[in-house]
Amino acid sequence: MNDFAVRDVDVVVIGAGQAGLSGGHHLRRSGLVADRDFVVLDHAPRPGGAWQFRWPSLTYGKVHGMHALPGMELTGAAADRPSSEVIGAYFAAYEDAFDLRVRRPVDVSAVREGEGGRLLVETSRGGYATRALINATGTWDRPFWPRYPGQETFGGRQLHTANYPGPTEFAGLRVVVVGGGASGTQHLMEIADVAAETTWVTRRPPVFRAGPFDEEAGREAVAMVEQRVRLGLPPRSVVSVTGLPLNDAVRAARAKGVLDRLPMFDRITPDGVAWDDGRSIEADVIIWATGFRPVIDHLAPLRLREPGGGIRLEGTRAVRDERVHLVGYGPSASTIGANRAGRAAVRDIRQLLERERAVV
């Protein structure tokens, strides 16, 4: 295929992270042949999904809730190896084992209505006319940066979790970490060992979860996220409704005062951050551990969004277009959720393709 061709396929999968590889696996099992009946596109330079971009100090032993891809366990990984290396190698082996032949790097610019009832997927390496689409683009490429008065005046460094380099760059500095999720607490616990001073600020008081996070609690958390998606609202992450795990490392950090939280500041000054009650803190660095938003702008030509701002789903299927499935979105954003969503999407797509063939 040359760079300007338009190729007919049955299914296009956009993204080769956990959700995309799960979808590709179930497409392969369904009898479709990769490179003829379906294609997996990925804009990243190598296998690993968003994991390949994680900071070096996030070792595999620190990863919470990483579930294996369907059909192939991740075994023998050393806990002290960077998660980017461990999971990148695992994803690469998975692609080879199931002959998924992911095309990369390929940037998808738009998905729009094509000819003959097909969707046209426009990419940096030509177009694909497809009968169905699995969108598995995740959130990593869309970090969320809140805006506060005076932000542009800050004389120090500002960065997001997406660009976090690890703790060593903050040795001897005064660091403010913004955000009450898992990334924020991990950043704090690492940086506190080398920084001159750390400050943690969050919009809401953090909730720490003691005890095991069992299957019933997981189902309840997913149901809360799923309800928003069914209403057409932008999804919240599953982590946002589960709370922070209260493990030994977190207990120790709380005992040392590292995780003593302050309410969100009201403005940023050239020297730090300030509150309207007169309190202020000087800082050299502000780290925004403020999460990510779904990467779905390329779907805009299909007009799938609801007035609430999100894409309403039934299962994984977009209510406004049954040809489009979103996996790794909303309730399926966790690794185990992505596995299940990939299987569900392929089941519905097979039914769609069979109905179309029956009509012909």
Image (cartoon, grey):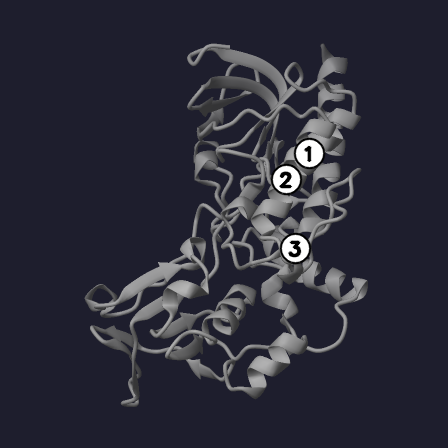
Q: Is residue 119 left or right of residue 243?
A: left
In this figure, which residue is indicated by the disc labeled 2?
89
Q: Is residue 199 above or below residue 299?
A: below
Residue 168: percent from left, percent from top = 42, 64
Of callouts 2 and 3, which one flags the residue occurring earlier in the amino acid sequence? 2
Residue 351 visible in rendering:
yes
The quadrant in which residue 62 appears is bottom right
Using the image as rendered, state which of residue 293 and residue 254 is in the foreground. Answer: 254
Q: CA distance from mark 2 to mark 3?
A: 32 Å
* Quadrant for the C terminus in the image: top right
> Residue at image x 27%, y 90%?
278
Q: Please name the amino acid that badge 3 sits on.
A: Glu
Of callouts 1 and 3, which one flags the residue occurring earlier in the amino acid sequence? 1
Give the numbered dot on residue 110.
none
Give the numbered dot on residue 93.
1
> Residue at image x 70%, y 37%?
22
Q: Please name the amino acid that badge 2 sits on.
A: Ala
In this figure, which residue is indicated by the disc labeled 3?
226
Residue 78: percent from left, percent from top = 69, 53
Using the image as rendered, state which of residue 261 and residue 224 is in the foreground. Answer: 261
Residue 85: percent from left, percent from top = 59, 46
Q: Is residue 243 above or below residue 327?
A: below
Q: CA distance from mark 1 to mark 3?
A: 32 Å
Residue 20: percent from left, percent from top = 63, 36
Question: How many C-alpha atoms fall within 10 Å of the one at disc 1: few (<14), some, or many (≥20)?
Answer: some
Q: Secondary structure at mark 1?
A: helix
The quadrant in which residue 346 appears is top right
Mark 1 near mark 2, Cβ–Cβ under 8 Å? Answer: yes
